[in-house]
Amino acid sequence: MTFRRFAAISAAFVIFASSSAFAQMAPAKTADTSKGKTLVDNKGMTLYVFDKDAGGKSMCNNRCAENWPALMASADAKAKASGRWTVLARDDGKMMWAYNGKPLYTWKNDKTPGDTTGDGVNGTWHIATP
């Protein structure tokens, strides 16, 4: 009986610890691409930064945002932001993720995980690196 109780308590602890760690996970991860280590979203799509963004504000709106979708954040994401990860408000009032103060985007022309076709577009878009 004592062993069963110990096993049940141990299992509960593992589940609790795993769910706590999951809640604190970063909104993106690092992956190896043809251009080296890159930040990617949860689908493995390359993330980019925009040279025109400044002061922790996204300057990519309207048509730009159609081509470069932001890495969107949920309404409660600010509570999960920590370290290098922050959440910024966009001009449309929606929230997006930033890494080291730089807003993060995907590129509509990247079709498969690991694509990096947005790097260097217009000389202002670059792969987000860890």
Image (spheres, rainbow, N blue to C red):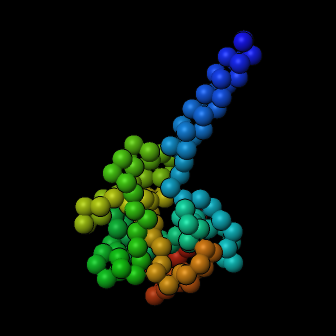
For this orientation, the residue located farthest to the left is 92
Image quarter hosting the N terminus: top right
Camera-side residue of 51 and 24:
24
Number of numbered labels in the structure image: 0
Q: Residue at x 60, y 38 (%)?
A: 18
Residue 73 vertical placement versus 37 (above, below): above
For this orientation, the residue located farthest to the front is 1
Percent from the top left, x then y, of residue 87? 39, 54
Percent from the top left, x then y, of residue 96? 38, 61
Percent from the top left, x then y, of residue 90? 30, 64
Q: Is residue 30 left or right of residue 85?
A: right
Q: Quadrant of residue 94?
A: bottom left
Q: Is residue 83 left or right of residue 38?
A: left
Q: Residue at x 41, y 77 (%)?
A: 68
- Residue 128 showing in the rendered view: no
Image quarter hosting the C terminus: bottom right
Q: Residue at x 48, y 78 (%)?
A: 107
- Residue 69 showing in the rendered view: yes
Q: Residue at x 56, y 72 (%)?
A: 46
